[in-house]
Image: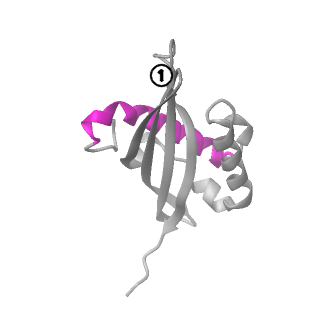
Amino acid sequence: MPGIQNFPKGLSFMAPPVSRAVCKITDIISRDKPQELENLLTFSAKMKLIDYMSTRLSKVQKEIIKLKPDDIKILVPLHVALSKNGNKKNCRVAMRVLGLKWHEQSHVLKLVLVALQTEFLRDYSGGHKHSEWTVSAFDILECGMLTQIPG
């Protein structure tokens, strides 16, 4: 996958779905269409992100947050947790995502930094061996344009 280097081999299967999910969700945020988050995130993750979109992100941040796969430079697995509760078996994978891209503002190219922390959940119970990963957390840690101060 372009843009992602040296992903840990044991979790390399996560790189494509993480990238697709991040790109889709950042696209929805940039278009300010929270209703399109339905069925992409767990209910609690969706409500938290909608609240963040409406109260914490500026118009400029919404404009610059959209990432494409090539913009994603680093994916770092933070932890993997397997859990079993009765017949229920789940796997949770937390990831840090760093995106860098160029954005033109007033005819000047500026470097944009987008840092995210995501968590993915998959149900491995009974007949769910081929279930999809669900986004169970999507936290925006940083979204801004980097500027260089002459020194």
Q: Residue at x 50, y 42 (%)?
A: 119
Q: Residue at x 53, y 59 (%)?
A: 141
Q: Is residue 17 above or below residue 103?
A: above
Q: Amino acid at mark 1?
A: Tyr
Picture quadrant where residue 79 is located? top left
Q: Quadrant of the N terminus?
A: top left
Q: Is residue 17 left or right of residue 66?
A: left
117 or 100: nearer the viewer = 117
Where does the image place residue 16, in percent across and percent down from the top left? 40, 32
Q: Residue at x 64, y 54 (%)?
A: 62
125 or 112: nearer the viewer = 125
Magenta-highlighted residues: 7-31
Where does the image place residue 37, in percent across and percent down from the top left? 67, 37
Q: Does 13 lie within the magenta span? A: yes
Q: Residue at x 47, y 65 (%)?
A: 110
Q: Quadrant of the C terminus?
A: bottom left
Q: Is residue 96 left or right of residue 46?
A: left
Q: Dot 1 corresponds to which residue?
A: 124
